[in-house]
Amino acid sequence: QVQLVESGGGLVQAGGSLRLSCAASGRTASPSAMGWFRQAPGKEREFVAAISGSGTFTYYADSVKGRFTISRDNAKNTVYLQMNSLNAEDSSVYSCAARPRAVARQTAYEYNYWGQGTQVTVSS
């Protein structure tokens, strides 16, 4: 079982930055691939970014490419999402997820463990 706890959300002005953190605890066979997803009210959950277990490979949604950066510190069991140049469309609940494989994926159903989410609100 893996527990995930997100932090770092909040209110920011358009053009600003936030860094989200996701701390993982519990038993894993090897560093798990991690992903960030977001869901706004009335919308479907959407993929944001993912990173492989080693941190070598990263993937981004087109809507955040060039603005967001996913990274991880396996010594701290923590994954980060640095978000720059935020706009109102980025307002959402952001959740991190883990899957019991080192290879990252971009679809939510391939992730077994989820955090409770953290709210990001961007004011225009």
Image (cartoon, rainbow, N blue to C red):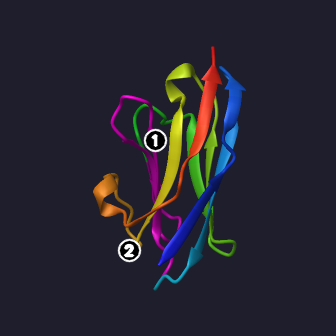
Name the residue furthest top.
Answer: 124
Q: Which residue is mark 1?
A: 38
Q: Place residue 40 in its image quadrant.
A: top left
Q: Position of residue 105 (x, y in %)?
A: 34, 58
Q: Which residue is mark 2?
A: 101
The quadrant the C terminus occupies is: top right
Q: Which residues are magenta?
A: 30-59
Residue at 47% across, 72% down: 32
Evaluate if marks 2 and 1 touch, with contact meaning CB atoms under 8 Å apart: no
Residue at 39% across, 62% down: 104
Horizontally, is 7 left or right of 109 in the view?
right
Q: Position of residue 42 (x, y in %)?
A: 37, 28
Q: Nearer the viewer, mark 2 or mark 1?
A: 1
Looking at the image, is 17 positioned above or below residue 27?
A: above
State the mark number for residue 116.
none
Q: Place residue 78 in its image quadrant.
A: bottom right
**Numbered disc total:** 2
Residue at disc 1, secondary structure: strand
**Is 10 covered by the magenta stretch?**
no
Horizontally, is 62 left or right of 116 in the view?
left
Q: Position of residue 26 (x, y in %)?
A: 56, 79
**What's under tag 2, amino acid-wise?**
Arg
Residue at 69% across, 46% down: 8
Looking at the image, is 123 positioned above or below residue 84?
A: above
